[in-house]
Image (spheres, grey):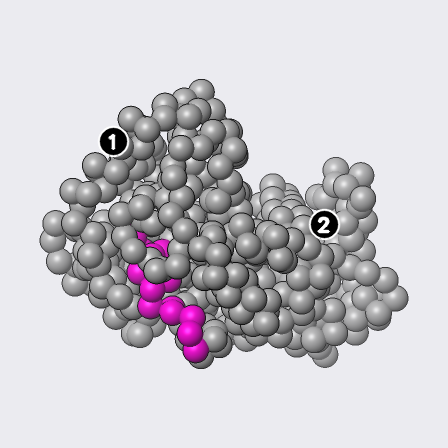
């Protein structure tokens, strides 16, 4: 089935350029074009639109206002902001109603990949009733402004770590939280990090961006989850799983990109729990009541009662935000015990495998929840990677890490 994409820009030459550039996508997408916010809303009132890509600077109704109207009137539409490097003020205004921010000039590959990934994210949630409920959340977490500014800076080319660190340093609160975190036992760095610029140099831009994203997500849910939902415990679990994933990636000698993706996916693997608990409280209450009464796994009960899991919901959100497909897949499959579940096979663990087993190891070594049913690692997924000897090697590597960390 074709997806419908609406492009909005007041400059005819820009719309014409988009038509030419995206002509190869005609078999997959129905593409609509509007020259104003008012025209865009009229089109959306007449037919279903899967995604909106809007310029920021337009006369009359500008991009931020249009996307706010789309969020209110058509909340299930994916919202993209597309504008030039200089529109930093408008970027700030567009953060709240936007799923992703893309900078001009945006080449065909970047635009197509961003849209395809966001559209694919909707397919990760099989229960369309729950998907619709989540899509209609007015206050769905959005990417923090500092994250978008870093992304825009990266789109220009290859900025130095100092430039990225300077962007982080402008957000004093975020800088303080990042420095507290990177100096904790979760990272185990050999020396104290005193400035955001140092943190970027030591850990890399991708890891710093994921830390910013994680801190922002947990902060946004502080007053929105049920009173008996422990953000502190979930934060500690997420940080430990990320540290364990990094350790396994090191043992397996993965490349930097794969190691970073494993860390990012592990850090964000349970964000779906936050969404479900905050916005589907009745369903979540029933799930956790069954988990405690029958000593069962959360994901197993979610699948039974809701027709989806927090893994799929989290992957949906991360897909909307445009995180790498490997990260989204790893989050979506982190409870899957099947052989070859999104992994490369051939006895070598991929990013999804590492996140799966890092999560199991944390539940094996640490007590996360007194009612959580322990999951034996003997699964088809483990057998495909060498069985218990390999798991034991990973576990021994984790045990020497001295993970205690600090709670958020």
Which residue is found at the position 51% from the left and 65% from the top?
A: 289
Picture quadrant of residue 11: bottom right
Which residue in the structure is indicated by mark 2?
Answer: 17
- Is the residue marked by circle 1 packed among few (<14), some (14-19), or many (20+) residues within 10 Å? few
Residue 115, visible in the rendered structure:
no
Q: Residue at x 72, y 50 (%)?
A: 18
Image: magenta residue range = 227-242
Residue hosting label 1? 393
Q: Is residue 338 above or below residue 407?
A: above
Quadrant in which the N terminus appears: top right
Q: Quadrant of residue 46?
A: bottom right
| Front disc: 2 or 1 | 1
Residue sticking out furthest to the top: 346
Say which element carries label 1. helix
State the SS at label 2: helix
Structural crowding at the residue carrying mark 2, measured as other residues with C-alpha within 10 Å and reported as few (<14), some (14–19) or many (≥20): few
Task: Check if mark 2's residue and mark 1's residue have beta carbons within 8 Å.
Answer: no
Query: Which is more toward the observer, 140 or 222?
Result: 222
Choose between 293 and 53: the one closer to the eye.
293
Residue 393 seen from this side? yes
């Amino acid at each position: 089935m074709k997806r419908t994409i609406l492009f909005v820009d007041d400059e005819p030459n820009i719309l014409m350029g988009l038509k030419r550039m995206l002509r190869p996508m005609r078999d997959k997408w129905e593409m609509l074009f509007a020259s104003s916010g008012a025209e865009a809303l009229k089109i959306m009132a007449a037919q279903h639109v899967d995604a909106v890509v809007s310029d920021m600077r337009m006369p009359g109704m500008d991009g931020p206002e249009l996307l706010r109207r789309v969020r209110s009137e058509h909340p299930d539409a994916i919202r993209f902001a597309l504008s030039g490097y200089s529109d930093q003020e408008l970027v700030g205004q567009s953060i709240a109603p936007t799923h992703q921010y893309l900078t001009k000039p945006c080449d065909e590959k970047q635009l197509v990949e961003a849209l395809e990934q966001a559209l694919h994210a909707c397919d990760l949630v099989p229960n369309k009733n729950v998907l619709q409920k989540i899509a209609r959340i007015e206050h769905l977490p959005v990417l923090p402004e500092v994250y978008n500014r870093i992304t825009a800076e990266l789109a220009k080319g290859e900025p130095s770590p100092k430039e990225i660190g300077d962007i982080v340093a402008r957000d004093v609160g975020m800088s303080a939280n990042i420095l507290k975190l990177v100096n904790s036992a979760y990272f185990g760095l050999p020396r104290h990090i005193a400035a955001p610029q140092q943190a970027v140099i030591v850990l890399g831009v991708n890891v710093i961006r994921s830390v910013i994203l994680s801190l922002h997500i947990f902060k946004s849910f502080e007053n929105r989850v049920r009173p008996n939902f422990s953000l502190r415990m979930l934060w500690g679990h997420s940080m430990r799983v990320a540290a364990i994933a990094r350790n396994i990636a090191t043992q397996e000698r993965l490349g930097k990109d794969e190691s970073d993706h494993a860390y990012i996916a592990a850090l964000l693997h349970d964000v779906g729990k936050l969404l479900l608990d905050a916005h589907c409280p009745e369903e979540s209450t029933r799930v956790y009541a069954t988990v405690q009464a029958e000593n069962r796994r959360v994901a197993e009960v979610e699948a039974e009662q809701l027709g989806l899991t927090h893994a799929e919901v989290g992957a949906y959100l991360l897909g909307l935000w445009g995180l790498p497909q490997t990260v989204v897949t790893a989050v979506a499959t982190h409870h899957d015990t099947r052989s070859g579940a999104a992994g490369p096979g051939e006895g070598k663990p991929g990013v999804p495998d590492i996140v799966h087993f890092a999560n199991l190891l944390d539940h094996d070594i640490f007590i996360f929840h007194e009612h959580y049913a322990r999951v034996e690692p003997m699964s088809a997924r483990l057998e495909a990677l060498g069985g218990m000897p390999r798991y034991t090697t990973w576990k021994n590597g984790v045990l020497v890490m001295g993970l205690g960390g600090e709670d958020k």
